Image: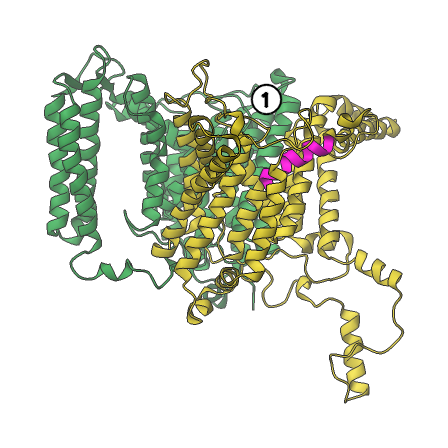
Chain colours: A green, B yellow
Amino acid sequence: MSTTAVPDVAVAAVDEGFWTRPRKVGLVLLALGVLATVLFGALATGQQARFTLSETEGGAALEIQGTLGAILFGVVAAAAGGALLAGVPKRWFTLVLGVGLVGFVLSFLCWQVSAAPEGRNFMPMVNIVRGTFILALPLVFGALAGVLCERSGVVNVAIEGQLLMGAFSGALFGSLSGNVWVGLVAAAVGGAFISLLLAVFAIRYLVDQVVMGVVLNLLAVGVTGFLYERLMQTNADKYNSAPRFGNWEIPLLKDIPLLGPALFRGNIFLYLGLLLVLVIHLALFRTRWGLRTRSVGEHPTAADTLGVKVLGLRYRNVLLAGVVAGIGGASYTLALYSFTKNMIGGKGFIALAALIFGRWSPTGALLAALFFGFADQLATYLGAIGSSIPSQFLAMLPYLATILAVAGLVGRVRAPAADGKPYVKG
Amino acid sequence: MSDPNPVSGSPDKEPATEAELTATSKADRGATMTSPKQPAPGPRPTLGRLFLDNLWAANTVTVTVLALVLAMLVGAVLIIVSDPEVLATYGYITARPADALNASWTVVSEAYANLFKGAVFDPEASGFTAALSPISETLTYTAPLVFTGLSVALAFRGGLFNIGAQGQATMGVILAAVAGFALPLPPVVHLVVALIAGAVGGAVWGFVPGILKARTGAHEVINTIMLNYVAVYFLSWIIVQNGVQNPDRADAISRPVDSSAALPRLLGDNLRVHAGILLAVLATWAIAWLLNRSTLGFELRAVGANPDAARTAGISVTKTYVLVMVIAGMLAGLGGSQMVLGSTANALTPLVIAQIGFDGILVALLGRVKPWGVLLAALLFGALQAGGNRMQSYSGISLELVTVLQALIVIFIAAPALVKAIFQLRAARAARLQTSLAKGW
């Protein structure tokens, strides 16, 4: 996005000299750390803050006195900020930043958990981790769909529509056939249908890709909402009672504390999502297809000169993105809930945010999705312990984080150079 | 897209009439001294002939009308496939095709007849109020869409894609409502203050992506999408705060706006049309003036067309981006304000502004990002909305069909080459979308 920067900016020049980006980040982190130490430390109570490894209050747990924890972790965050401010080697930047942010979050949690009413002042870590993964899953699929599209130079704002269409057709055909696998294939086809429209109009008719994405989202909301009211609401037994995938437990691995219940007792979509991250990562950076995809996304003319079929590759990748997002949509209707109107409810846009926050890479997208999922889960948890922090503000977190990222405050993000630009063979 | 059809390829780029060009060049060859500006000699076509020629050319009006027709055809298919009874007749279509066709025709024609009756005129209506009711409903739905449409269109002309009209309208409606029930003011002043509050709310929400774009190059599409959601959560938070939430209610609804801050109704209390539609016309005129007659408008269009050239010419791109987004935000904020100050609702609820921001994008595109075009497009969308309500209650066809129709219309007009190919239209200028975007992220 910095490609469209207006050169008469005042910030760009600051990067040189003392105030490098790590230093500015360090300053912010230091401020956050001090804030955590003083504010969270003062607000935390003397109660124990328990982080239990199980789902209940009992069992093994990490325990720390509330005030002490809030101050301690606040100091950790401040120290990390101070280190960045003083100047650390570049390769340590991410590590130190990570330590600082984790410290800030832990300080916050010590305050919140210790201030919770008696009997609820514990945090079941298993639930949090599992919830994080469940909530992050559609974002992972959506963001991967974005990666596939945008790495080859087609902006995908239609993720929301692809997820929704996938969820809908998965539910519809799963119900009609009574077979989950038919539903899964139908979901993939449904997502690919929206993708096909995006591809044809963006690549063949050169319609602005962002415009097309926005319109396709509305189309998907309209079509699924219409058919939902006409078919599913009137005859839910026939049209909206899709069979569901059960949970598959992986022996041995499922007994790992904390991660076991979250990662190895999930349904097919969890495994598929994580596998796809790995596969797409390897494919994108280790195979011929990946190299071609990236080159088409960065400089289509050069790729064309070397004999890569730019438009063909873009069609293929956009369709593939639809398949991935469609399956992501099915992770709702073929595993958790029955279809309801507009059930994706903006997850497609958070997925877009995760894609950008993760800097257009599959692993980055996964981490961003997990972060957003964590924020979401935390909001639920804090609501349950009667926190004074309004859940709405936590829900804003992913969006605000993305704005900061895009503005270059958290880390410079750069889109593929040809993202959004239609290619016309000269 | 600075030019959606670069190089050649698409016939939309071709000048008005190929025949005329050929004629001119032939004339040039025959009489070398003829200025190319002079019209080609030969028999002057009759007015009627010209009209017919233009009627079936891919001009703006024809493409829009045909896009509407295509969208309604797809809508008809959706109505048929989603009606189990009609679908059942297709089971034996080879045996008795008339059954299937009759059933389809009945359900579709009834739905669209109700759409028309709800939006324009109901021949069975008796009495003054009943006869005017459809128009009143249409205008009620039109007014806020004009504002959000203008917001998106203005930003487009400045080279920015404002997906954030939804968020700006949300902030607008929050401030307008709070001003509407919290301030004890006399009638006219109260309304003005509430409207200004709404405009300010939208302007702030437009300023943020504007300044970020200008100072850091952060893409406004991403930021406005994110701000939309921030605004939604802010709305859902503020509704349940003390002093805002209606003390008599347990659900998420705010106190009602005082009647002194309400927009006056134009045709009596039984018809919902209110002064918002007059404000909408006024705003359209103002934006048209701003774009075409003012210095700011010139700078805005210059930046939209080519920021580098504009900067070279001494125009501050930074300032223009910020101003465009602030004005766009103000417009969207005003549009949002009407949702509580007008007759649609008088209190904040989580869904108080419905989809007006997103619909505004469609309206702006359908109106070819021109102010008066936006007004007409908003009128069409308002009519669809009003008609959709009647279609839902009389024919049981879900209101969602209207969303489908609206999206389809815009898809078809966004790709005039497609409409042209389907209907074998002759080439003409205009018709294509002038969205000077596509600088990527």
Q: Is residue A120 above or below residue B84?
A: above
Mark 1 belongs to which subunit?
A
Q: Which residue is mark 1?
A: A175
Across and down, in percent, residue A299 comes to 44, 62
Q: Residue at x 52, y 36 (%)?
A: B336
Question: Magenta part of the protein: which range?
Answer: B134-145
- Specify the amino acid type for callout 1: Ser
Residue A255: tell me if it is visible. no
Q: From the viewer's side, name the closer residue of B42 and A216.
A: B42
Percent of width and height locating residue B263 = 57, 32
Answer with the quarter of the image where residue A278 lies. top left
Residue A9 percent location from the top left of the image: 33, 60
Dominant secondary structure (helix, strand or loop) of the stretch shown in magenta: helix
Determine the residue positioned at 59% across, 68% down.
B7
Q: Is residue A2 shown in magenta? A: no
Q: Are there few (<14), some (14-19), or many (20+) residues within 10 Å of tag 1?
A: many
Foreground: A319 or A119?
A119
Residue B314 x/y as whole percent: 42, 70
Helix, strand or loop at mark 1:
helix
